[in-house]
Amino acid sequence: PLAPAVKNFTLNFTITNLQFTSDLQKPRSRRFKSTEKVMYHYVSLANNALLGHTVSQRMCVTFFPRSGRHRDDTKVDAVCSYKDSASLARLDREKLYQELSTMTNNVTKLGHYSLDRSSLYVDG
């Protein structure tokens, strides 16, 4: 049998109460790691809700923060990977968006971070 294919998708959103600073560009900084941990937690919860708890399907998240439009904003691009096979559930972009929307109180809260309600986008 063929090994499941690895597929990628990207989540984009804007955090409105996390001022972008140079330490968010440094993956070894305490601030980057702390922020990345929160992002990974919520993406993993959405993954589990949609794809089940199959270990082989867990997503790897690569977190790319960047400067937002306003001083206190940080835009986030999170590149996620998952394994896709005919015997396992496939990623449904619309369901993932709905799951993340529900988990973030209609795209307003991500843990202790506030979100720009119109900023969530799932591509892939």
Image (spheres, rainbow, N blue to C red):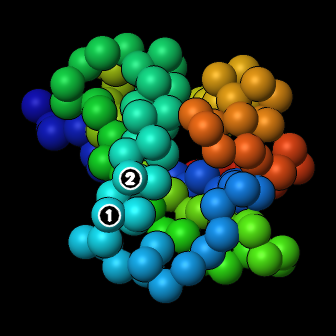
Specify whether residue 62 is in view: no
Q: Is residue 45 above or below residue 20?
A: above
Q: Secondary structure at mark 1?
A: helix
Query: Which residue position holds label 1?
Result: 30
Position in image of residue 8 (x %, y %): 44, 54
Say which of 80 and 26 sits in front: 26
Dot 2 amino acid type: Ser
Position in image of residue 28 (x %, y %): 25, 72
Q: Is residue 110 above or below residue 61?
A: above
- Give the residue at x 16% y 39%: 3
- Give the residue at x 61% y 38%: 112
Near mark 2 (Cα within 10 A), the count class, few <14, some 14-19 or many ≥20, is few
Farthest-out residue, bottom: 22
Say which of 71 and 106 sits in front: 71
Query: Which residue position holds label 2?
Result: 34
- Give the residue at x 45% y 54%: 35
Dot 1 amino acid type: Arg
Q: Quadrant of residue 70?
A: bottom right
